[in-house]
Each structure stands twice: as structure tokens, then as C-alpha cells.
Image (cartoon, rainbow, N blue to C red):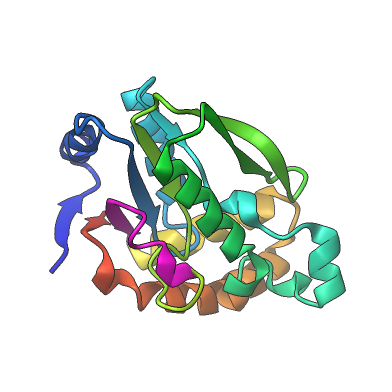
Amino acid sequence: MALTIERADFTGLKARACRLVESGQRRILGITGAPGGGKSTLAQQLVDALAPDAVLVPMDGFHLAEAELKRLGTHDRKGAIDTFDGFGFVALLQRLRRCDEAVVYAPTFRRDLEEPIAGAIPVPRDTPLVVTEGNYLLVGEPPWDSLRALIDDVWYVEPDERTRLDRLMRRHMEFGRDERSAHDRTHGSDQRNAELIASTKQWADVVVTG
């Protein structure tokens, strides 16, 4: 059974991450959860607290480009599991795990552009901890099922559901959607993604609540 930690106990979460840093080898910490759950915020807080011993590599850098989503006819479901380059994400974590290159460059995702940007995040070989965050770290189907063996510790972030939905709607509106469109996206494709992600919680090492 996963350990449950209240998010307010950031000191305890930081201490757990510090043990990965202190192992003396490259370690990968994964933070997952449903859209709007706060995983990006928690991941950034940890990296800031552990700097320069940690770097953040988000899964969102593996969104397919807007043009490709439109070609595939999946643009209206952007964020669903099949709108990411899962094999590319696995390949990157394999390189980060091997830690045999002087520096590995990871992509990022620009919400203002709605596009992934390649080669944006340098991960030097001597950085002991990589923190990765994303929706599908614990999904048990290929290629995502390869991730669990590559990640040392996976935390599932689970806020109050009302808070999560309100936060997700605000985010959609901040990036240009009107209230009706934001509501439909939040309770439509985003919610279907959230239900898939929730089914993976049982494989997390830690559940972060609150």
C-alpha cells in the first residue's frame, strides 16, 4: 500500500527526495496525477528546494506538435494519452537513467505557444536527481509500462476533487478559452483522462493529499 503524505508536510516530502539525492547515483523521481492536480507546482517546488542537485524534466515536452495533432484528427483531445510521443519519453528516461552522456537535452512545453520545444532543458551528468512529472507515469500499457522500472519513486498527487476541477477550469480560461469551452474541456476529455490516471494510483509509492 502506498504511503500517504499530506501536501502541507513539504518538509517530509523534501526529506524523501533528499534521500534519492544522497544515494550517490542518478535517481529519477516521478510525480503524477490527474490534470489540474498540482503536480507541476509540487515538482517545481522540490527542484527549487534541492537546487542545484535536481532538474525538472516534464512529460509535457512530448506533446505532439499542433500540426501533427490536426493531421491525426486528435487536436480536440489534446492531453489524451495518444496525443503524446510515449516512446520518445521512454527513450529519454532511458538515456537519463544510463547517465553516460556529458549532458542530455530534454524538451519542454510552452503553454503560450501550445507547442513542445526541443533541446530546452540541459541535464548534466553530475546532476543526481531528475524530477519528472506527467499524467501517465503509471499506465500499464505499452510504451508507458516501461516507465515504472526507470523511475525510483513515484508520487501520486491527489487534491480535493472540487479544487482540482476549479483549478483546471481557471487554467483553461487563462490560456484563452471562454467559460463554456473551459467547462466542456474540463468535464469532457480532461475528465476521461483523469479517470484513466486515477486507475493507476495503486502503483504509486506515495499519495500526496490535500
71 or 164, which lies in front?
71
Q: Nearer the viewer, residue 160 or 96?
A: 96
Quadrant location of the N terminus? bottom left
Left-right relation of 23 to 75: left
Q: Position of residue 51 (x, y in %)?
A: 37, 22
User: Compared to 116, does 18 lie above or below?
Assistant: above
> Is 78 in front, or is 51?
51
Q: Residue furthest front?
A: 100
| Residue 13 image offset from top left, x and y in percent | 21, 40
Q: Position of residue 58 (x, y in %)?
A: 52, 46
The residue drawn where x is 72% and y is 42% is: 117
On the picture, is 127 further left or further right than 168? left
| Residue at image point 74% right, 50% down | 114
Numbered marks: total: 0
Q: Residue at x 42, y 50 (%)?
A: 38
Q: Is residue 71 found left or right of 44 in the rendered image?
A: right
Quarter occupied by residue 129:
top left
Where on the picture, by quarter, is residue 42?
A: top left
Please identify the quarter of the rendering in which residue 210 is found.
Answer: bottom left
In the image, is residue 153 part of the stretch drawn in magenta? yes
Q: Residue 184: within the magenta?
A: no
Residue 14 vs 199, above or below: the answer is above
Magenta extent: 144-159
Where is residue 72? Give x, y as percent.
81, 75
